[in-house]
Image (cartoon, rainbow, N blue to C red):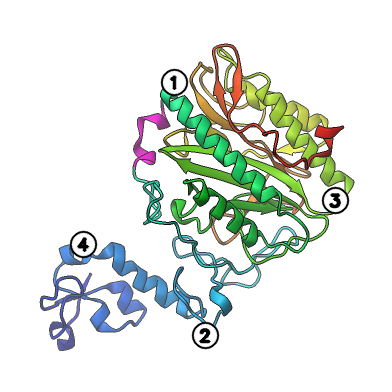
Amino acid sequence: MSADSDTAVSSLSCANCGKPAQLQCPKCMELKLPREDSAFCTQDCFKASWSSHKSVHLKAKLSTFGIGIPGEKNSDSLSEGWLYCLKKGQARTPKLPHFDWTGTLRPCPISSKRIVPAHIDRPDWADDGNPKVEPNSDLQHVVEIKTSDQIQKMRETCRIAREVLDAAARVIQPGVTTDEIDRVVHEATIAAGGYPSPLNYYFFPKSCCTSVNEVICHGIPDARKLEDGDIVNIDVTVYYKGFHGDLNETYFVGNVDEESRRLVQCTYECLEKAISIVKPGVRFREIGEVINRHASMSGFSVVKSYCGHGIGELFHCAPNIPHYGRNKAVGVMKAGQTFSIEPMINAGVWRDRMWPDGWTAVTADGKRSAQFEHTLLVTDTGVEVLTARLPASPNVFPWLSS
């Protein structure tokens, strides 16, 4: 905070409590914002109002680009409520025009935040974007052994998540936008009484991730229409009755080239082979060895920056499950543990890059990437795939019907 010698400051009221103001927010001064929005009586008042006051800075920055705050209408610069993705104030497109895009994909506008009805039970980040319990939980270091009641709730949540992903898979075709896929995911989740876990998780603006072509993971649903020959991964997580269920699959859009078909099938097989070794006593690090062996024998590479994870009442927790070989994951599997395996396999190099939106991870060489994921339960004798395909799941993978 800065004391302003200008007498105009002392004539203003504190933006927080209404008392005479003696201080001014330095960021507001830098942005040349109106004094009445930036005057405070004390440091304590300034700190108390920071969580809401900082949005004034964000709004001012965005206005210079003709961009609105998420959830607000800005029809002068954007049509039909389309807004650009923001994460902690980052614009979806870079300020400089020479960002080094690795492939042909580009960010497109996204729609405003979807509404979750008041009766839906929601995780602690739903309102302000900040997980409270998860980062400081002991379960970031200790792998939980779940009770029979917890396991039953996990089964219920994971079945809903599977049904939601299947609903999304049914609408995939050339011409459909990934934003439309997100709408299907959102509405199917709400209809089942769940909350879409990604929505506002660390400010992620959508209800699922849609990763197209060179996007490895965390792609943001937007206005781009899927094109014939694309591949698209849809990553769904549902929060229901206090538990999360997480899965994803990569789908073909229309007529896909042979290398992309090989990549997607290999990634599916990597997950299946990894699941086949899950049982009590197996080291977590063995999962990466199995996946790496199959991917490399097929001429593909394994992403190292993103791992599988423990899941339950927390979205992400211990254990970490690396998918690459010679990893240093610690611990052995025990009955009652639940975690995801979600290999990301690239057609080219394994390295990744991040788009300016702070979320979209893409291959460093612009070649395609595929991913599959299941949430798993270690049983006394092996493994139960909690997000397994159902008899009603759409028959979209040729190798399953051959």
Where residue 104 sits: x, y (%)? 75, 62
Q: Considering the image in quadrants, where does the C terminus appear?
A: top right
Give the structural element (helix, strand or loop) at label 1. helix
Instruction: Name the residue rendered at 32%, 73% in the picture.
Output: 27
Q: What label sits on residue 256 in the rendered view?
A: 3
Mark 1 or mark 3: which comes first in sequence? 1
- The alpha-carbon separation of the residues under discs 3 and 2 comes to 40 Å
Mark 3 surroundings: few (<14), some (14-19) or many (≥20) residues within 10 A? some
Is 33 in front, or is 96? 33
Instruction: Name the residue rendered at 27%, 64% in the picture.
Output: 50
Q: Considering the image in quadrants, where does the N terminus appear?
A: bottom left
Residue 276 among magenta residues: no
Q: What label sits on residue 48 in the rendered view?
A: 4
Residue 138 among magenta residues: yes
Mark 2 surroundings: few (<14), some (14-19) or many (≥20) residues within 10 A? few
Where residue 56 sits: x, y (%)? 35, 73
Q: Which residues are magenta?
A: 133-141
Where residue 200 sits: x, y (%)? 45, 55
Mark 4 or mark 2: which comes first in sequence? 4
Mark 2 or mark 1: which comes first in sequence? 2
Q: What label sits on residue 148 in the rendered view?
A: 1
Give the structural element (helix, strand or loop) at label 3. loop
Instruction: Look at label 4 and name its amino acid.
Output: Ala
Instruction: Name the residue rendered at 46%, 61% in the picture.
Output: 115
Q: Is residue 116 at least partly visible in the picture? A: yes
Q: Which of the two discs, 1 and 4, sits closer to the camera? A: 1
